[in-house]
């Protein structure tokens, strides 16, 4: 009988992270350069939260009354209690939680240290692979 995979089998390992005291404009530029929307936040190598492109957009806002990104640090924008799971957590549990709570990512830890990140993009990639595995394409003998 097949078992539900653990999160470690579908996560993105060794994700980038940013120090909580880093200037927000540097974190934002890095996220844009790397094409990422979720960035774990650390302090002295310890995982302390998450920053997302959405968090940045919300804090900078559409008006001129908001502070500029040069005035802010990652600490001003990050979410301290972001969703975090152990490396061995079952994938279905993570997916259920993310769907129920409208969470776009999970930080994955091993012995309390950042080991990976699992995002909606990773979920789509894993589901696509699952579908290909379950429903093999036709042999090609069918006419279009």
Image: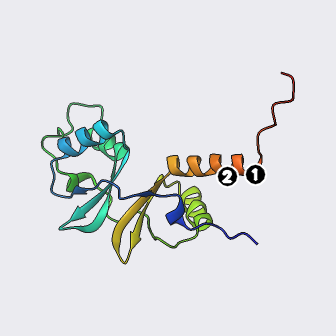
Neighbours of disc 1 within 10 Å: few (<14), some (14-19), many (20+): few
State the residue at coordinates (56%, 68%): 6
Q: CA distance from mark 2 to mark 1?
A: 6 Å
The residue carrying mark 2 is 130
Q: Which residue, as the protein is rendered here, is positioned at the far top?
A: 144
Q: How is the image coloured?
A: rainbow
Q: Name the mark on residue 134.
A: 1
In the foreground, 99 or 111 = 111
Q: Which residue, as the protein is rendered here, is positioned at the far right?
A: 142
Residue 43, position as x, y percentages in the image: 20, 65
State the residue at coordinates (29%, 67%): 47
- Image quadrant in which the C terminus is located: top right
- Image quadrant in which the N terminus is located: bottom right
Position above or below: 59 against 142 = below
In the foreground, 60 or 5 = 5
User: Is 76 left, or right, of 10 in this rendering?
Assistant: left
Residue 113, position as x, y percentages in the image: 33, 71
Q: Name the mark on residue 73.
A: none
State the residue at coordinates (75%, 51%): 134
Contact check, label 2 and label 1, Cβ < 8 Å: yes
In the foreground, 70 or 19 = 19
């Amino acid at each position: 009988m097949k078992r539900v995979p653990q999160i470690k089998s579908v996560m993105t390992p060794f994700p980038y992270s940013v120090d909580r005291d880093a200037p927000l404009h540097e974190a934002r530029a890095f996220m844009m350069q790397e094409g990422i929307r979720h960035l774990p936040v650390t302090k002295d190598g310890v995982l302390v939260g998450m920053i997302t492109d959405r968090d940045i957009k919300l804090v900078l806002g559409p008006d001129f009354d908001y502070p500029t990104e040069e005035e802010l640090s990652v600490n001003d924008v990050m979410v301290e209690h972001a969703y975090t799971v152990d490396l061995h957590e079952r994938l279905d549990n993570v997916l259920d939680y993310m769907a129920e709570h409208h969470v776009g990512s999970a930080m994955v830890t091993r012995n309390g240290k950042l080991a990976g990140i699992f995002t909606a993009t990773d979920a789509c990639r894993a589901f696509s692979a699952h579908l290909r595995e379950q429903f093999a394409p036709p042999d090609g003998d069918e006419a279009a």
